[in-house]
Image (cartoon, rainbow, N blue to C red):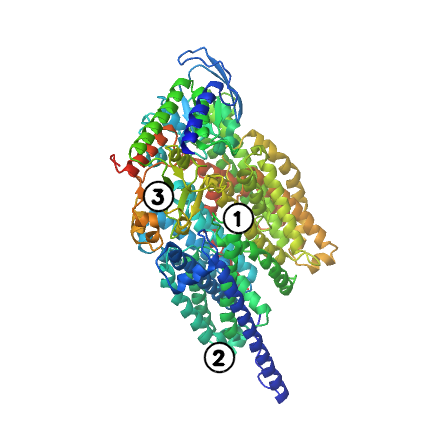
Amino acid sequence: MQGMAPPVQGSGRAAAQASARATHQTGRGLLVVALGLIVLAVLVVLHVRQGMATIAPSEIIDAILRPDGSPQDQVVRHARLPRVAAGIVAGAALGISGVLLQAVTRNPLASASTVGVNAGAYLAVIAATLFAPGLMLFSSPLVAFSGGMLAALVVYALSAGSTATPTRLALAGMAITLGLGSLSSILILFNEYTISGLYFWGSGSLIQRSWTILGDTWYWVVLIGVVSTFFLSRSLDILGLGDEIATSLGQRVGRIRLIATLLGVMAAALAVTIAGAISFVGLISAHLVRLAGVRRHRLLLPAAALWGAVILVGADVVGRAYAGQFNEVPAGIFTALVGAPWMIWLARRVGAMQGAGAQPVPLAQAARPARAWLPWVMALVALAVVSLLALRFGDSHVSWTALIRTLTGDAPNALIRNALIDHRLPRMLVAGMAGMALAVSGLLVQGVVRNPLAAPDLVGITPGASVGAISLLLAMPDLPVGLLPVAAFSGACISFAAVYALSWSRGLNPTRLALVGIAASAAAGAITNLIIIKNPMQLTAALTWLSGSTYARGWNHVAQLAPWLLVLVPLAWLTGRWLDLLALGDDLPQSLGVRLDRTRLAILAIAVGLAAAAVSVVGAIGFIGLLAPHLSRLLIAGKHRWLIPFAALIGATLLIGADAIGRSLMAPDEIPSGLVVAALGTPYFLWLLWRSRSIQARR
Amino acid sequence: MSSLNRRTFVASSALLALTGVRSVSAQSTPTGSPAAERVIEHVGGTTTLVGDPQRIVVLEWYLLEQVLAAGIQPVGVADIDGYHSLVKLPLELSDQAVDVGTRQEPSLESIAETLPDLILADDGRHETIYDQLSAIAPTILVPFDDRSDDVTPLDDLHNRVHLIGQAINRPQATQQSLEQMERVLSEQSARLDAAGLAGIKFAIASWYTNNTDPTLRMFSNQHIVGDAVAGLGIDNVWPDTGEPVGFSTVGFEGLVDLPAETHFIYIPTEDGGFADLLANDPILTSLPFVVEGRTYGLAHDTWTNPGTVGVEILVTRVVDALTGEGNA
């Protein structure tokens, strides 16, 4: 998405052409702005008329011009007007933020939500409400703001800043969002009564109690907008030409980038402060305006701000119409539902631009080890040790002797036998199998998408399963709960099929698949949130499934999961050769006779089968599909025929360990294993990202 | 309308007590008869119980309330800390009771270790682990409510209490809990009559801070809080909006259309934030019932998911607040 290249030299005709283009563009820009103002005016009128209290339009006008202190007037002046103003200010802030972040990263997918601002703000607010309520009373907007800023800056730094490719930034943001989100979930799960109300805010809400927050923030948004439009526009235009050209034209690239990033992230954090966690607005508004032909930032910034306001107010109007008179539905849900199709459309264009020849960049690669058997031995030992520990430790006390005696058939008493054979052993087996399935699935998906940051969650498997499961659990509670695995499995398959179909365009572009998957995740997440908000008393049940848990998994679950592994893992192993070939790019395999699309589909089908089976039994466990493959690559070098079994071992070890920790750490209280994995996995994953940044720079 | 509701309630509760709920077999005998066998059909299936359960594990607070009210101490309870801090009822839980984990995911090993002979579980939370629980001890899966439209929350309470009574083999004690609650309802209703407040319009809400959003939970008669207070013979003006949970989450704007003569009852949070808002918020201070002083705050720890004991406390506090008497 480059700016218009200024002609350096040329004939008079070229100069005339250039100035004609410039006028044309200015004309277009003004048209966009004028259209935006009209649409915004219409939406504002619609918005102000919506609300629980019955207030006629003439009364609304009276309330603004000739207030008389009646409840209706107060509602208009102190509830409705602040709400629509919040939509305008937050929407504008998101629009500005989107443009700035996209310019800085030269990345059409950058926006507030994709860089982790929302997740950071959410966690900060939850943590402060629980542990530092004084801070919240003092200035809750400040808490949200700081949290958002911190998270975004971490994402930016970890994804190697300006050298980040579009996918890398989006994936890094997703990882931070997942990690911080898991911490938030843990806090909510253990404080269900006190802070379940924050779940609503976490989905983005324009409700305002008064003008206070707006009063503190609106001028900052205006300031940022003005500064970036009048002082940064030209620099940003030139920056869009590439670092080298920009430097040669005299721009201080590093400094501009830093200022623009700070301003962009600040604007995003301000938006979160006003309206909670809202996604996609910055993304859509910037591209909408660019589509209309506006390129230069001097026009782009104000236009994107305007259209950001349009989109957010519009989403709120739609949301309130959907919710009916007596309910509130967070605006953030609707921006995601509207934004996801938009992002899918964008992804199809971006993928095409990036080209299908993207080389894989492994995050890290082990040097060829001298003693190739050592990692295997260590992995097997680790698995054995963790399994024994998982059996030994838990809520009831079981000594080592008792353990050995029970395993050999001579249990000391019925309680111990019950604890080990009926509860811990099947849990351990389910955890092991699910971990194996997710790890192998992750490896396969990474091999096809050719991106080391890919995971089964990415191609829509886990989010789709979540929609299926939460629909059954919450929206259709009369259906037998035994159907839960079926619902989850179907959801996963349908979702994957949709993602695949939507990203297929004259062949499968791996990058496009990843990006469409992210958009589908967001949409599925919005739908899941919607169901949860309509059933607030079952928040805990929903969150537990969404976190992923090996709780109370028994021998029947072992029987459910085992067939899938027995069939699919060997099949996955057989695809190892193809995966090796796929890693070499697109041209080489094709020239060797590999039919790319069919091979990819076959491998993905196996991956989906494994992941869907695992998720349908243990819920939405993320991170193992992401972590285990990387750990494997770090520890052994080699072909996929070695990587696959090794990753299986690692995955099993990870989840068995998480299961053991989750039920022992705070016994008898249980921490869902999925949250344990995510909470422990995030620091490690961040470290991996940090390392890979320097590797990439050296290439 | 309100007195007709109460009459219907009394009649139907008597009728239900006689006919039983969910085809409980008519073999239940008075308490203390060890050889009594009773077959209970419930959401999880059919369970046969023999005699008096001595070691009961209770996995939800609304179940605990009725068990304690019937005079039985359980050996295991889920989330005891939460019960003590959030559910403030004058029902003592023995120190001997073992905490068996969270209500959503109680520890199966801990439950087994208490060597229970009966487990009381909640249909909503524990349906997925019913098989595992049954493997440890006979388990009764209690449904919190009947999801069909014509069963009121007080009817649901009656059904639950009846089922629990059958399970713990104390049908008379649990019936007494219900009758006691009914007595308190009548007494408090009479107090209101005496104060000239019969038939007034009211709305009852709980306030909880939602970060910076102003949110009130307005209870309709589809929630037991609304239904119980309406059972005092007064008129709940908040309509049934079709929410499965029985309450609507609204901002202050939702109060504007309430009739001016509404008596607004609220349960605040501990920090007193709502009282501040009543004094200062521009929308709230313009409402007629706020201006004319018809707002009544209950104690912040009033439990909003009450059983028989909780309902007694709730309606007593409401009448204390409305009449300005009592030590509220």
Q: Distance between the residues labelled 1 and 2?
A: 43 Å
From the viewer's perspective, is the residue at label 3 or at label 1 nearer? Answer: 3
Chain of the residue where label 2 is placed in the rendered structure: A
> Badge 1: few (under 14), some or many (20 or more) residues near its Cα, within 10 Å?
many
Figure quadrant of residue B181: top left
Task: Please indicate whether residue A196 sits to the left or right of residue A577 in the image.
Answer: left
Callout 2 amino acid? Gly
> Badge 3: few (under 14), some or many (20 or more) residues near its Cα, within 10 Å?
many
Answer yes or no: are tags 3 and 1 on the same subunit.
no
From the viewer's perspective, is the residue at label 1 or at label 2 nearer? Answer: 2
Callout 1 amino acid? Leu
Figure quadrant of residue B328: top left
Give the quarter of the figure containing the N terminus of chain A.
bottom right
Chain of the residue where label 1 is placed in the rendered structure: A
Task: Please indicate whether residue A582 sits to the left or right of residue A692 in the image.
Answer: right
Callout 3 amino acid? Phe
Q: Where is residue A633 in the image (x, y as percent from the top left)?
A: 56, 50
In this view, the residue in front, B50 or A427, is: B50
**Residue identified by numbered label 3:** B264
Give the quarter of the figure containing the C terminus of chain A.
bottom right
Chain of the residue where label 3 is placed in the rendered structure: B
> Badge 2: few (under 14), some or many (20 or more) residues near its Cα, within 10 Å?
few
Label 3, secondary structure: give it. Answer: strand
* Residue in the image at 49% along x and 13% along y: B27
